[in-house]
Image (tube, rainbow, N blue to C red):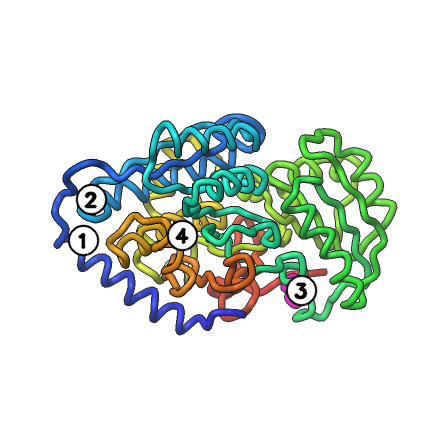
Amino acid sequence: MTIDRRVFLAAMGAAGAGALAQRAAFAQPKGEPIRIGGTLALTGPLAATALVHKLTGEIYLEDLNKRGGLLGRPVEWVLKDDQSKPDVARTLYEQLITSDKVDLLIGPYATGNILSAMGVAQRYGKMLVHHTFGIPKLAKYDRQFSSWSFGPTPEVSTPNLVIDALASTPHLPKTVAIVTSKFPSVHFVSVGAREVFKKRGIKEVLFLEWDFGNRDFGPIAGRIKEAKPDFLWVGALGLEGNQLIDAMKKIDYAPRNQFYHYPAPGPMLRAPEANNALSVTIFESHPPFTDNPIAAKFVKTFAERAAKANLPDTAVDTQAAASFSAWQIIEAAVTANKSLDDKKLADWLRANKVDTIQGKLRFNGPGNFGDDLSRVKQVQDGKWLVVWPTDWAAPGAKIRVS
């Protein structure tokens, strides 16, 4: 399901105006802090992206406490470093619940760590709101809720969305090479993409996998060049996409058309060979997304704070938007119920929708997932621009393929 742009703008504009008008009415929060516990990969191979989530949470809580906190009380984030390791995340969520005795939980970054946190939350009956869970079919716990709005079957909907975007041009590819990291989320979608491309009549000429943490992309680049695909699908995470681009450059090969699942957006923009590369997104820092005043304010604040923190990416995109939305979900549930009771909050979320900067989220589908709100974006002359569906495209932007 897609959200109509006009409906989105009307709802978000009203919500934003209401929140801004209410801000002056809030008194300073008082009393014992409400403690929200979670972990992030502050060190290890996932740290570069997790730092985006850390900054987003800090920005959100600073603003939340200026608006009166939750239930009139200040909100405190008890954050621990899971070192990018699911087993460490599991131990730390046990500590958060049993030793730190936090009131609520927010999930870590990345599918493996979230799954570990989910198991702990289930043992203790705690609600878990999380933001980057990439394999919805594994979300079996009824009190977990995701702001990762790629729908309940991204292994089907994501490749179909990309093919629909390509089909809107005169140059729908006839062949595809699919190469992917074995990192759980991107691998899951890439494997699903094989069947989708087949059903859509696009011939697979190469399927190749690598272990997460691989640094030698030369052999992979060579296999891609030999296959000569019309379209290259890359199930890469973070800087893996740039490493593959560099390897292809070294052998004087440039794919005709290329897609990267979860790239590091800033570094990819700075690679000339990535011009016209495609990806998927739930939010970009341009209209119509920034027509929402809450989103516009966050985009501005994030850019300023990210620059001061020397983060390589200062624009809000999928990662920061999903993280911001997770905090919005928690705030909406607590405010609507005037409660911190995990069962009451979880029951309310399954029965209601929440307005977020990426759209209106619902949690009554398979695994408590809702609609797929993703869009296709493309690197165009040094900027990431949404190009599909057309009613969500950046002003004047059209998809480019060859």
User: Residue 53 location, x and y as percent?
Assistant: 44, 40
Residue type (three-letter) at the residue carrying disc 1: Arg
Query: What is the C-alpha distance between the residues marked 2 and 3?
Result: 43 Å
| Frontmost residue, 319 versus 70 | 70
Earlier residue among tags 4 and 2:
2
Residue to which mark 4 is pinned: 325
Look at 83% across and 39% down and name the residue there.
222
SS at circle 4: helix
Earlier residue among tags 4 and 3:
3
Earlier residue among tags 2 and 3:
2
User: Residue 367 location, x and y as percent?
Assistant: 54, 57
User: Residue 324 location, x and y as percent?
Assistant: 39, 48
Residue to which mark 3 is pinned: 160
Query: What is the C-alpha distance between the residues marked 3 and 1?
Result: 42 Å
User: Residue 61 location, x and y as percent?
Assistant: 29, 41
SS at circle 2: helix
The magenta-colored residue range is: 161-165
Earlier residue among tags 3 and 1:
1
Residue to which mark 1 is pinned: 23
The reply to whether the C-beta atoms of the residues labelled 2 and 3 are less than 8 Å apart is no
Query: What is the C-alpha distance between the residues marked 4 and 3?
Result: 25 Å
Q: Is residue 336 above or below residue 271?
A: below
Residue type (three-letter) at the residue carrying disc 4: Ser
The reply to whether the C-beta atoms of the residues labelled 4 and 3 are less than 8 Å apart is no
Circle 3 Cα neighbour tier, 10 Å, few/some/many (<14 / 14–19 / ≥20): some
Question: Left or right: where does residue 89 sit relative to residue 102?
Answer: right
Residue to which mark 2 is pinned: 66
